[in-house]
Amino acid sequence: MERAKIKIFPNETNELAEEVANIIISEINMNNAANRPTVLGLATGNTPLDVYRELIRQYREGKVDFSRVISFNLDEYFELPPDHENSYNRFMFDNLFSHINIKRENIHIPQGLTSLKDIKEYCDSYEASIKNAGGIDIQLLGIGRDGHIGFNEPLSPEDSRTRLVELDKVTLNDAVREFGDVKLVPTRAITMGVQTIMDSKRVILIATGDHKAKIIRQAVEMPPNPEVVASYLQKHTNATFYLDQASASELTRISKPWIFGPVDWSNPRLQSRAVCYLSETTKKSIAELEVGDFVVNMMEGLIKEVPLATLKTKVLNEMVGKITSNDRLPVKKSVLILAPHTEDDVVAMGGTIQKLIANLNHLACVYMTPGTGAVLDYEAQKFAMAKLIYSQHVGDKSLIQKDQDLVTAITQHINKKKASRFGMPDTVELTTIKAVVREAEAAACCNYFGVPQCEFMNGATVEKVRMVIEKHKPNVIFACGDLTDPNSAHRLCLRVILSAYRSLPATNLPELWLYRVDSNEFHPAESDMLVPLSATEMEAKIIGTVYHQSQNYKLQLGTKQLWQKVEERSQHLSNTLKQYGVTGYTSYESFKKHTPIIPGTTAV
Ligand code: F6R
């Protein structure tokens, strides 16, 4: 099924980064020994960060000398100054070049400030420099959610070379993460072409996180096609896709292994997954599935392992058994909810929170990161103005002056930012107000649900998580189990939580339940607990979501408001269950139990 060479690595380990870094280091060491330079093609973005950290670590240990390395970066935003906080020039120095002994004159990164009239000549000279250096020995790539490599967006010509390109809508939206607002994202970039990349002697494409799973399946399983530019790498003689389990999760061999040939059908999770898949593809309820459905879908072995009637009853009972209402949720226990951002708990478990409160549990919600990047400027300005207007109402002269100064400073900065084309970093005052906005929303939302304790960690570390656990002594912990970008706040928080959790004494270990925020709820076959919500609980959950006013703006083109997403994901899960023939509720929340690690396996 796969048309390209792939290697899959466990989630939540550094194995992928170590292997890629070791390949690069071996190449450099081999060339250094032969007195030859090494030419590296480098990428920016979150994906290669772990590899760069590993290269730096090994450099510091004296295991590699970069003095003969010549580097060529894939791309840069057009018109963005090289010292802008989101420029790829700045990224490379901050995350790699400033920490190793590469020579300044050996570094090549496209310059975004090249004038439009010189661009053709500039791009041709970039190509010529690569050629003069002897061609790229190893090209490192990430992949965009639209399949781009470099900034070669869908429909980029296969024979393209370094040039100026327009960015795709998906790419612009993804860059909101850095620029804060889609209006501030540069719409053009200079990028190496598809052919430039294909000319490299060796290509290593890395993809991590389940947000890349769909595009990886297309890039690896569909024939080379212009819609998914990364699929052209199938034609390269030495290109490998390095994937973590999350980004590989939609590959047919992982999601539908039975299509590849005999599988071990005795595995109960696989049995449920297969039956659910069949119900979803045939659009029949589980009870309606027939022998023919299994035969046509290459699952004959499954009904040989378990007779059809038994299998259907077993999977249906299993689904029903996962439905956990108040009577099976904890009662009068200490429950700790760890959320990466202030709205994550209500999005993922706003209904369950209500049930836990009704069951007289003691709840503490601890928010791990400030999440200030996701607050729009005018929302912060509004809060600062509210502070001033309040002081004016109560007539406190010293406060009025201070608040007036704050409003002036913030307003001036916002206006300056507005006038700048690509934005600028927030001042301390603005960041602080943004943190205040999010904390106030969370505190008010906790109050709305009746959660007595609401705390802010202000940056997650293993030590802080351990202290929170020691303080609250929870019987049960809920945490975000998103497997998106490993360098996203969600997955970094998960890493920290798992490290802290692993260090707890084995006796009286609290239960650890994972919820999802970034994607849909856990798939019913994957989840261990489905909490049904009454219409009243769902309505209260939506109201709780709206408390997070700063997150109910459309930061990205075409995206929905937070409360709409909450409604949709719940309905999606409910529709899937209805499809199986499990009826009863229109809204659910889903959770997966974390099983402590057996050495050599993965955490989640
Ligand atoms: C970066 C680049 C892009 C990124 C891709 C994935 O130099 O050329 O193709 O590799 O957009 O970005 P991340 O890694 O941030 O998901």
Image (cartoon, rainbow, N blue to C red):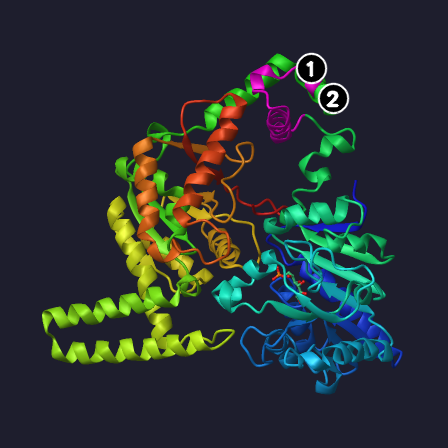
User: Circle 2 is placed at which residue position?
Assistant: 296
Q: Residue 324 appears at what percent x and percent y?
A: 40, 30
Identify which residue, 428 or 310, lies in the foreground.
428
In the rendering, which numbered label is found on residue 291? 1
Residue 202 position (above or below residue 361):
below
Residue extent of the magenta highlight: 266-293
Does residue 64 appear in this view? no
Residue 216 position (above or below residue 91):
above
Report the side of 447 relative to 204 (left or right).
left
Report the side of 243 relative to 399 (left or right).
right
Q: Residue 187 appears at what percent x and percent y?
A: 59, 67
Residue 30 position (above or below residue 156):
below
**Which secondary structure, mark 2?**
helix
Q: CA distance from mark 1 to mark 2?
A: 9 Å
Quarter residue 379 falls in: bottom left
Q: Residue 426 appears at what percent x and percent y?
A: 42, 74
Queried whether the magenta region covers residue 124, the answer comes back as no
Question: For the view shown, which residue lies furthest in the right direction?
Answer: 34
Q: Residues within 10 Å of mark 1 (few under 14, many from 20)?
A: few
Q: Residues within 10 Å of mark 2 (few under 14, many from 20)?
A: few
